[in-house]
Amino acid sequence: MIKSIEMEVTVNQYGVRIRKCCASCKDRDFDDKELRCCKLTGKHVRGNNVCDKWSLSDRLETLGCEHGKVQCRAYQLFLLEVRTSELDMRVRGKEVTPASVESIRKDFELSHGTRFAIH
């Protein structure tokens, strides 16, 4: 039985909170049209649904381990804002050279501190 939930959360072995939903399930798959489907049932599902057989994906189980870092939401939004403004200028016919990721990171860290939520 698949049900839609508001927000049920679990914590992986590294203390990272992860929303329980189809998108975070180990049995999530995609069909040949890139539509989300369940490996167990073969049916198409929405990303925010969760079923009784949900289990955390291997990728998310290791999120937060010593092999990687998680960027904070503020940095992600900052990067999105920079890229959106560059795109807006191009749409208006202005010649724009995209800022390098390194320069965007440096600008963010100078004004906000670290860009990582989890090290």
Image: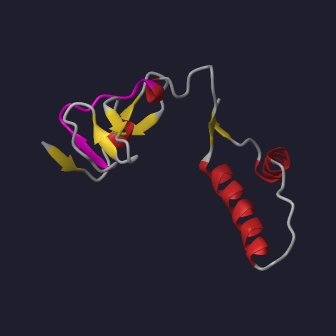
- Write down the quadrant of residue 29 in the picture: top left
Q: Residue at horizontal 71%, vertical 55%?
A: 79
Is residue 21 in view?
no
Asked if residue 96 is positioned above or below residue 115 in the image, the reply reads below
Residue 26 is drawn in which quadrant? Answer: top left
Res. 117 image quadrant? top right
Q: Is residue 59 above or below residue 82?
A: above
Asked whether, in this view, residue 67 is left or right of residue 31, the answer is: right
If the image is split into quadrants, where does the N terminus sit? top left
Q: Residue 63's spot in the image, x, y percent?
A: 52, 28
Compared across the picture, whether 101 is left or right of 60 comes to right
Relative horizontal placement of residue 82, taking residue 48 as reference (left or right) = right
Residue 5 seen:
yes
Q: Is residue 52 magenta?
A: yes
Who is closer to the viewer here, 81 or 116?
81
In this view of the protein, which residue sits in the foreground, 31 or 57? 31
Q: Position of residue 83 (x, y in %)?
A: 72, 60
Q: Is residue 58 above or below residue 70?
A: above
- Would residue 117 be counted in the magenta stretch? no
Residue 37 in percent (x, y) is at 29, 41
Q: Is residue 116 above or below residue 75?
A: above
Q: Position of residue 2 (x, y in %)?
A: 17, 45
The span picked out in magenta is 48-58
Q: Quadrant of the C terminus?
A: top right
